[in-house]
Structure formats: structure tokens, C-alpha cells
Amino acid sequence: MTYELRVEVAPPWTFRLRGGSADGLLRRRGDSLQRLLHRDGKPVHVAVIQPRPSRVLFGARADSETDAIWGIRRMRFATGVDDDLRPFHDRFRDDPVIGKAVRAVPELRPRRVALPWEALAAAVTEQLIEFERAIAIQRRLIAAFGRRCPRTGLRDVPEPAVVAATAPARLASFDLAPSRALTLRRAAAEVASGRVDLLAEDPLPGWRRLRAIPGVGPWTLEMLAFLGQGRHEHVAAGDLGYLKLVGRITTGNPRARVDEPAVREFFEPYGEWKGLAGEYLRLAAGRGLLDFSPARSALGRAPRRRGTRWSASDPRSAVA
């Protein structure tokens, strides 16, 4: 790789660079985050550093300027550095459910991935099993099929074409359930063939094709939309963490669990910010910032607008 590009970004909203990813694709090395990507088979190495709160530096090394620009664009998306979240914070900083968390951690960003295919593949592996087990499966797939840079030791996610050409039994050998192996392979084939364009401006045709695959349900597509395509209006309502949290909030019963429609009703007042509201709900639960008292549950299922997911050991999903 011969071309190097550096871009300095001033985030429009308070921002803090997070750590690496659980699957090992995004790694923290010193003060920087490092990621290996590929564009049309050519490697792109991207590094991100935040020297001070008001500045974030992106650096890319690639075969061409075009590839370097592409790599930085994908990592800007993954970090959410360009997201202006002021409208969300202005609207929900006093929300009776997530307001404390919104005020406490204004810099929160969803943990997106650089490419939507990563989000789709991860969602399939995370269906109906514990998160830690799913991460172990993802790491095995990356080690077996992901392209590696000998100089940096970084690996990229396996290409859809590679996964599509792999026998289901081979995929299942990494502890992936046989049905999930078939689902992953079929989804990969749709993406590799171009029949599903995960970067299309209009995602609906692609979602419809993916939804026709056995094993791809609303939860999988909502994880893709939110973490892989940056659509804040989507929340994975079938997530077991949300079923439990919303049940406890709305009833005051620590063992209560609601159904998926009740979770959707709960998040409806958050409008185009449902996904981000879900992230704050998880954060609030983890930091003890939620009020589970019977008086609080009397507010009803849906939180009020301003002026008028969770345990780490929980399975990620109750549905596909």
C-alpha cells in the first residue's frame, strides 16, 4: 500500500472514541483504533485517534486515493463522529425513563460496524444464543476466512462470496447451529450476487429479499438497519433484553416480560430516535439509572415526550 491520507474531523456533537470490538476486527493499539478493510479486493488500513475532545484524526493507507477516501468514510460511519445528536438530546434529556442517562453520557454512540454485511452476519450468529458464545463463533469465522494483513496482524471480515461458497457443515463446525449456517450462507449469497445492495440509498428492496430467507426475521433486519446502516429509527424490539426491561419498567415486577408488540409500543414516542433511545435504555439499566418503582410503572408503557437491552449474560434475541 502506497497512498496515505489524513483527515481531521470536528465532531458536531460531543464525542469520545470508544475501544475495540468484541469480534477483534476493530482493535485498540495505544491511543488509536485500527481497522483493516478491503475495497474490490484491495486492502485499506485505517487508524483513528482523538488527540483532544474537539478533534478526531483519521488516517488511511491504501493503493489509491479513492480507496483511502472510501476507508475513512466507512470508519467515520462506524464511529458516528459526524452524527449531530443535539436534536435527540434537546428532546429527551428530561425524559422520565432515559433522561438521566442522556444527561450523564451525552457522547454515547451506537457501536456500529464499518460495513453493513458485518452487521448482517453478526446478527445471524447472535440469534437465540448468549452474546459471548456468538462472539466466539464470529472470531472463529474471522480466523478461518477473514483476510489478514501480515504487517499489522489485523484481519478483515470474511467476504460474502467466501461465506456463500462454504459448505453449511463447515460453517456449523464453528458452533453455529445448522439452521443458522444455512441462513448465513443464503444471506451471503444474496449479498455476493448483488441481488441485495446493503449500501443502497433505498434499503427496502434488499430488506424484502433478506426477509424471504428462512431464519431472517425482524430482529435480524433491525440489527442490520441500526448498526449496519445507521438508521436510528429502528430498534430490535424482539431483543430479550428489551422484553425484560420494558416488562419491569411498565409493571414494577423484576420478573415481568412483555411481548414484542409491547416493546414497539414502548419505543413509539421516541419516533425517529428509537434505536438510540434503546441504547440509552440499556445504559440506564447498567448504571442503575432506571426507576422500577410501582409509582414509576403507573406512568404507562410508553415514556412521555418532553413537555407533554439489559444484562451481558442475556441471550441477544428472542426471535430471528
Image (cartoon, rainbow, N blue to C red):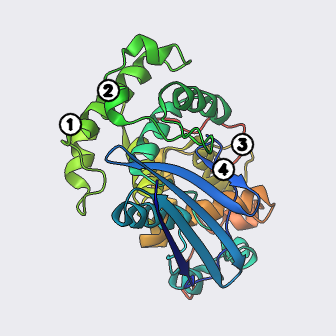
Choose mark 1 or mark 4, whichever is in front.
4
Q: Which residue is mark 3?
A: 312
Position of the C terminus by quadrant:
top left
Mark on residue 193?
1
Label 3: state its secondary structure. Answer: loop
Mark on residue 184?
none
Local crowd size for mark 3, using a 10 Å CA cut-off: few (<14), some (14–19), many (≥20): few
How much space separates mark 3 and mark 4, taking CA atoms?
A: 21 Å
Label 2: state its secondary structure. Answer: helix
Compared with residue 211, is residue 19 higher up or lower down, i.e. above or below?
A: below
Q: Which residue is mark 4?
A: 27
How much space separates mark 2 and mark 1, taking CA atoms?
A: 10 Å
Is there a contact, CB below 8 Å, between mark 3 and mark 4?
A: no
Amino acid beneath label 4: Arg
Q: Which residue is mark 2?
A: 164
Residue 88 in sight in this render: yes
Q: Earlier in the sequence, mark 4 or mark 2?
A: 4
Find residue 232 and report its image quarter: bottom left
Give residue 201's position: percent from left, percent from top.
25, 63
Picture residue at 25% right of the left edge, 49% below the top = 197
Q: Earlier in the sequence, mark 2 or mark 1?
A: 2
Amino acid beneath label 3: Ala
Residue 235 in sight in this render: no
Picture residue at 68% right of the left edge, 49% below the top = 310
Amino acid beneath label 2: Ala
Query: In the drawing, does residue 241 fall left or right of residue 146?
Result: right
Is there a contact, CB below 8 Å, between mark 2 and mark 1?
A: yes
Compared with residue 307, is residue 167 higher up or lower down, i.e. above or below?
A: above
Choose mark 4 or mark 2, whichever is in front.
4
How much space separates mark 3 and mark 2, taking CA atoms?
A: 31 Å
Choose mark 3 or mark 4, whichever is in front.
4
